[in-house]
Image: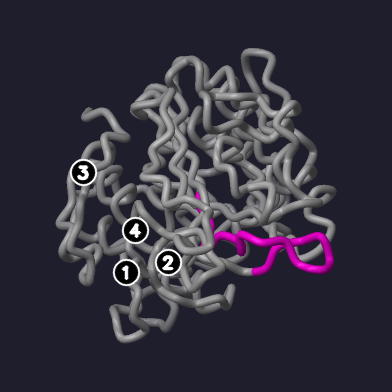
Amino acid sequence: LNALVPFGDADYISHRPTIHVPEASLTKLDTFYGLHPALTPLKPLYDAGDLALVHATGMPHGSRSHFSAQGLVERGVTDKAGPDTGWLGRHMANTTPASNSAFRLVAISGNVPVSLTGANDEPLAISNLSEFGFDQDIIDSGYPEVLADLYRSPVPFFGTAGAALSAIKELQGANLSAITPANGAVYPDTPLGNKLKQVGQLVKSTLPVEVVCLDSDDWDHHERLPEFIQQSLEDLAKSLNAFYTDMGTGMQRITVLVHSEFGRRVAENASQGADHGTAGVAYLMGGGVNGAQIVSDWPGLDIANLEMGEDLKITTDLRTLLSEMLIKRLGGTDVSTVFPDFSGPTSANLFLSK
């Protein structure tokens, strides 16, 4: 509510008397919604038709726990009894691989996200691409070949070790250090900016990357929300703008989706923050996005319309966005397999078909 601000809702300020974003400071998108001033770097992308925003979205899992909610969202289910694999992993398992590269599925992270589990291929988790591999003297010594011989089938961890060694060899050949930001793009020197800079290197390389996952921390604004969300939103907007600029015409074949495990309560708390809630906002960026639009069946902020009397209601299920993205941008999917307890709809006119 302080990112894509519904300034046209008369109840917005009454719920957030001290932490609301003043209307005069907003970058207005229409007569009802405006971007927080820190998100102004996204306005040119919106105007170019390469950014769409979805408000009052989320998954109706009912959890206020970061850990539980993130697990459910990444699994693509609303019930703990559902499959323990990830929605994206199940989709990738149902599609024909475009290559046998170890870089088909990548997470710029210290571990493989739940969303990628279940794929037929072993996803790669790499915290820092520049540190993934062996020093030249170790390569010259023949040590990698010794390791490869040790981890032959049927040795335990054969699959993981084999994928890692293969990835090291592929990465060495790609020479990512020679790939620098293009078109004047300047990434923020932040964890998110550095992760997206690495994604840019992967995309522009010869590596046949299909999916990249990454996360962004420190969005849990229970206190001093105006101060801290300024930093978070500025980082997000500058990072996305830099990636968009860096990719140039290549952005036509790239789709970026940004979402959270849940939104925040509508009312501010005593610490000038907002506690865990339900619906939030999602950002969709790329040449395949039906952009320059805000998709929202706005539920209203009158207390009678709030979920449990305190949360923004979900009116667009996050799985609608994900289903349409998989169908139109990632080659089609079996929605019943990817989201087994979801009955639709599977489109919100957010993406263009390939």
Q: Which residue is mark 1?
A: 118
Residue 163 visible in the snapshot: yes
The reply to whether the magenta stretch includes residue 248 is no
Instruction: Give the Cα separation between the discs numbered 1 and 2.
Output: 15 Å
Mark 1 nearby-residue class (10 Å; few <14, some 14–19, many ≥20) = many
Answer whether labels 4 and 1 touch (C-beta < 8 Å). Answer: no
Please, what secondary structure does the residue beneath circle 3 have?
helix
- Cα–Cα span, label 3 and label 2: 19 Å
Magenta segment includes 263: yes
Percent of width and height locating residue 108: 58, 52
Question: Label 3, on which residue?
Answer: 327
The residue sitting at 34% across, 56% down in the picture is 317
Q: Residue at x 51, y 78 (%)?
A: 68
Q: Amino acid at mark 4?
A: Leu
130 lies left or right of 246: right
Q: Can you tell which mark lies on residue 157?
A: none
Cα gap from disc 3 to disc 1, whole angstroms: 19 Å
Tell me the crowding category of disc 4: few under 14, some 14 to 19, or many 20 or more residues within 10 angstroms, Cα based. Answer: many
* Label ID, residue 73: 2
Which residue carries the number 4 mark?
Answer: 88
- Amino acid marked by disc 2: Val
- Region of the chain picked out in magenta, as a range: 259-275
Q: Quadrant for the C terminus, please.
A: top left
Q: Amino acid at mark 3?
A: Ile
